[in-house]
Amino acid sequence: MNAWSENAPSGSRRTDDERRLAAAALCAAVTLALSGLWVCYLLVNLGSPGVSESAQTLRVLVYGLPAVAAGVLIHAHWPGRPVGWVLIVYGMAAVLPYAVAAPMWLEHPSAPVRAAALGLEAAANWVKITLWYSLPLWFPDGRLTRRWRWYVAGVAVWVAPQAFSYAAAPERFGAPNPLASGWWAETAALLDGHLAGAQNISDFVLTAVGSAVLLRRIQRAGPGRTRRLLSLLLGTYLLWAAAQSVAYYLDERWQWPMLWVRVAASLVWLASVSYVVVRTGTWRIDRSARRILAGLLVVALLTAADVGLVAALVGGITPGRYADTLLLVALAFLMGAGLRRLVAWAVGVIDRLYYGDRAHPYQVLHTLAERISHAGSAQDIPATLCGTVVETLRLPAAVLAVHTRSGPRTLAAAGRLGEHPHHFDMLHHGTVVGRLSVSPREGQRSLDEQDTLILSSLASQAAPAVASLRLQEDLRSSREQIVTAREEERRRLRRDIHDGLGPALAGLRLRVENATARLPAEDTLREALRDVSDDLGMAIKEVRRITDRLGPAPLGELGLDGALRQLVSSFDSARPTVGAVLEPSPLPPLPAAVEVAAYRIAAEALNNVMRHARATCAEVGVRVDGDALILTVEDDGDGFGQEADHHGVGLRSMAERAAEIGGRCTVDTRVRGGRGTRVRAVLPRSVAASAESPATQLPAPG
């Protein structure tokens, strides 16, 4: 199974995934709360010795908290992937030690307490550095293979002395380091003396190994979305690694600029991880999972509010201590009173983020009803329905087809259906009158229950309108079949007369003339045979006149290719010059109705160019693809004026010729820098193609 489109689990697995998401959200909430307490603690003690030193470490929040958020997103979109815990542990290891160390700078506790804080910091740095080197190895599956687990274990062993040595610095937290003497310091000095140089080089080596592994996976992925997403991850990871390496070797003058560069690079990496997860993971999370995310959002908002409140109080917005107390009580009351609304708002935000309006089915139905009420005519309802489905439910495509006597016909489409469309029958008085087809979201192979419920309701609501349109489509389909049958019969008659009766009459006249030439001049029968020959000549002219009335003569003699080229050459002159572009050339076999409509529309359009456009050049283009013939006639003339009548006899006839075989013809003006006119006709290659494209074919109603 493709790692980028794994289906959401079900049954007990889904319960396990919800538990993992709840645990991840709890870790994120703890990290958020502790970060807020850290900031508030520093704000309350502004001006005290050691505050500035602890405040400098607040930069870890900029990349630690996004890492935790990315881990929660992975648990929501990639259920069961261990890489979510990797990012959460990485973010917590970056934030928690410095938050715990904040009181060490101000309170100066006893040596055992400081030693415990230093031990926690050393363990956190060890975990953080090890996970940082292993980050590229977790993609694209979000899991680590067995052989790379041994590699990560080796990296952990190699990184441990570096974290161990850093905790033995002579002075920490503005006081002598209790670990700077004794066995810890001696061991740290020994390791640092033997491994310092190698560990500096290993930074580049380990980064290169992780990047090379991800690059190899990119090459194996082949062209497509997977390669692009993996390339994004690799590029942002290398940017982050380069920023950290450069900052290590620069002097103190570049400390602050490089700090922000490192922070920006880490944020770009985490943003790319979140983007990849959201684009490739599943959006199928149930209501309990959405409430977990909503609760995490509430915690984040409350933490931000607490920090803002403490900052405002420290800033002296109230005149005294008693006023501060009253303000705290009032704000606590307001926050408690508004908590319910805040939770409801957070749930609504998460619902809209993941499900759009489908989290509120009645709202979707209300939106559809309101749009239908504003529709100009019944013909606009199918397009309104498809647009509502795609917009409110955030689906990639929706197609509405109606059942007619000649087969299913597409009424409206928004987007293009994928490989696994889902169909919803429209029932009216117990009869299937149409079908709404939709494509699942990217990364999903099926729709969830909520989508199914809403789409079934939408199909039921639109069924009466589709039933009324069904009669119009039946009439249109019958007309198209009549026109097609008429033109095919005319082409057959023209071919039979031209190839059968015409040559037979011409041969008979030749035989009469030969017989006449053999008779003596004084024979009275010669005059009678001459009369017969003249009558045969008149009959041949009448046959030609009849064949010309059955269809354009050049079509029968030259085909559409030759007929269009002859037509273009007859209009070509010094002003305007007319050219033709046919793709492919020669054109494939086409139904008679399509050939006649294309020829007549091209002739009428060129006639308008010669009579009205005052153009210097014009071009006739014909392109035939799998479903349709597309004819364009474009010139560089004056175009239509603002007061001109765009509904003349010629324009109406072109539109009617296209519409009677299920096509359409449009006329656009001012197409070349304020000048020119373009006539564009799209004609189906057959009535079957007009009725239904292969991607949306439907079975006949039972």
Image (cartoon, grey):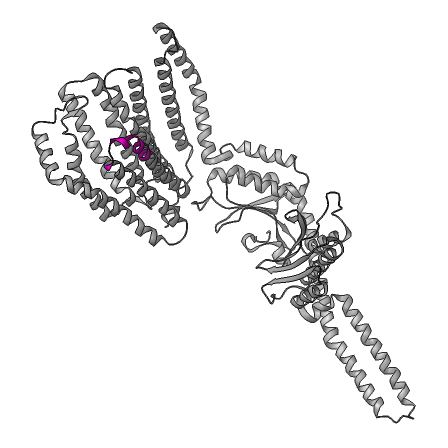
Residue 469 visible in the shown view: yes
Q: Is residue 253 magenta?
A: yes
Q: Is residue 2 magenta?
A: no
Residue 243 is left or right of residue 174, and the answer is: right
Q: Viewer-proximal residue, 173 or 652?
A: 173
Left or right, 14 with respect to 360, comes to left
Q: Please say if 139 is above or below 356.
A: below
Residue 689 or residue 239, whichever sits in front: 239
Residue 180 coordinates in the image, percent (x, y): 11, 27
Task: Please tell me which residue is depicted at 33% across the width and 40% down the height of the picture.
Answer: 80
User: Which quadrant of the figure has residue 265?
Assistant: top left
> Where does residue 393 sit, x and y in percent of width and height?
51, 38
Nearer the observer, 359 or 34 = 34
Which percent across, then down, holds residue 325? 36, 8
Q: Is residue 436 above or below residue 295?
A: below
State the residue in front, 684 or 51: 51
Range shown magenta: 249-263
